[in-house]
Amino acid sequence: MARSDEKRTGIEETLRWERIYHATFDGAPNALAIIDKDGRILEANAAAVRLIAADSKSATGLNLFDLLSGWDADSFTRYSFEDELPVEFSAELQAHGGEVVSVSVVVNELEGTEGTLVVSLVDLRRPASYRNMWRYLMKDAQDMVSLLDEEGRILSTSKGMVAFTGIPESEQTGSLITTIVHHANRDRIMDVFGTAKASGYVRMDNFEYRLWDGQVRYCSGSLYRLVGGNYLIIAQDVTERRKREVDLEVYGGMVAHELRTPLTAINGYVDFILRQGGLTEEVVDSLEKVRLSTERLERTAEALLDISRVGRRDLRQTLVDVQKVAEEVIDLLSPLAAEKGTTVLIPDRLPEVRYPEEDIELILTNLLSNALKYGGGEEGLPVMVSWRKYPGRHVFHVKDFGPGIPDSIRDKVVAPFFKTDDSDGMGLGLALVRGVVESHGGDFWFESWEKEGSTFYFSIPEQ
């Protein structure tokens, strides 16, 4: 290639990246600024200039920390050096023109640079800021997400919400939520909205929603009151899961009760025959096998009853030392850990929470036994139990370094009675954990990568 052609190609590539930059950074609807570690603005997009610099044409050179109340370079440098990024907080912005603006701030590192950070600023006074950020970041969300003002008027809505409700986006946007839904939903929606106004947050589990054609569907999620006075709904369609749960509650409880009576009778007859004596070794062996089979069926019946009772049990919440419970469960599972050639480690002491103690034991027993059975990785890699504190909740993690969960079964592993070919259980453990966690207003989910292991999470709301 001739030198002039190489130069032309280089210029074209530079221009291409400049166009990408202007589209993604300078043209972003929310305010973005690039700063150094001392807070000095190196570059700001058009929205940031309008917000920070008022009538000036540039915000370059201004110190952002001097403009934000409650934050300074020293405190922020401490966060950045301790790998605490991203940092999120609300503050008052003293704009260059003298105006004070309430903003939501997110600061993160700028990938590929050292000592350079990117800041996102959202003006909390104007719903339009939310709408612009929404369109830019979440317009294609498949989950059910809607942004509402303080009166319940829909400012924006996701594709997932349109698909669930069957109401076009054009009809939803700008309408009061109570005026566009089936009348059967209105009182329940007003109750949820009222609770969110009073407390700032409300959890919705198996929320019954009637479509305009009369069909009933269910969703689970949360409604949050945002700092600027607006409200955010984030939910998922759980209709199919709800149907499975109802079937399991009804049939699981019925089957369990039907099984227990004949199993008790069979065990009684086995004991009676064994007490008579004079039996051959072969007969005794056969009777012991009958006993083992009935005991296994009794455990199945108990598991079915546990599943069917989830959400309807009246268990007393006490202050539970999760560390103590975890250590007891680990001790109970030590033979299985020894068989698999691994250990269970707790890097940081687990906290105390208000929860039914037997439910904490049930959750940890199922997750740890599952990790030990199916998460065996390279020799010497342990199963890890850890936690993190978030606003309003504790999130616990059980991590293994095993083969991971294949994509082909990722959507099935938590379903009741799902078993892989090498499974020796009943396929109820993870379904039971999810039911218990969600019955207390928490969330249960997992992450997994083939050949890299799996991490199961469950959250416990603060009481």
Image (spheres, rainbow, N blue to C red):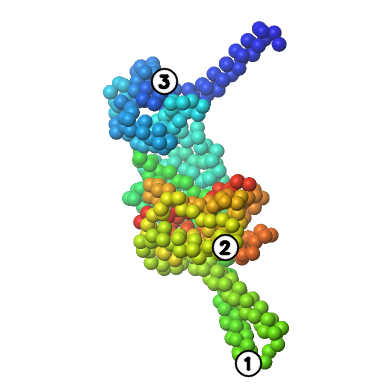
Is any part of residue 434 visible from this angle? Answer: yes
Answer yes or no: do the residues labelled 2 and 3 have beta carbons within 8 Å?
no
Residue at 44% x, 32% y is 108
Three-letter code, disc 2: Leu
Q: Earlier in the sequence, mark 2 or mark 1?
A: 1
Q: Earlier in the sequence, mark 2 or mark 3?
A: 3
SS for tag 2? helix
Q: Quadrant of the C terminus?
A: bottom left
Q: CA distance from mark 2 to mark 1?
A: 37 Å
Residue at 49% x, 61% y is 330
Is any part of residue 220 visible from this angle? Answer: no
- Counting every numbered tag in the picture gives 3
In terms of depth relative to the viewer, which is nearer, 260 or 374?
374
The residue that disc 3 covers is 42
Q: Nearer the viewer, mark 1 or mark 3?
A: 1
Quarter holding residue 327 = bottom left
Quarter holding residue 339 = bottom right
Residue at 51% x, 21% y is 22
The residue that disc 1 covers is 276
Residue 231 locus on image (x, y percent): 40, 43
Three-letter code, disc 3: Leu
Three-letter code, disc 1: Gln
**Mark seen at residue 336:** 2
The answer to whether 61 appears left or right of 384 in the picture is: left
Q: CA distance from mark 2 to mark 3?
A: 57 Å
Image: 355 above or below 19: below
Residue 128 locus on image (x, y percent): 41, 32
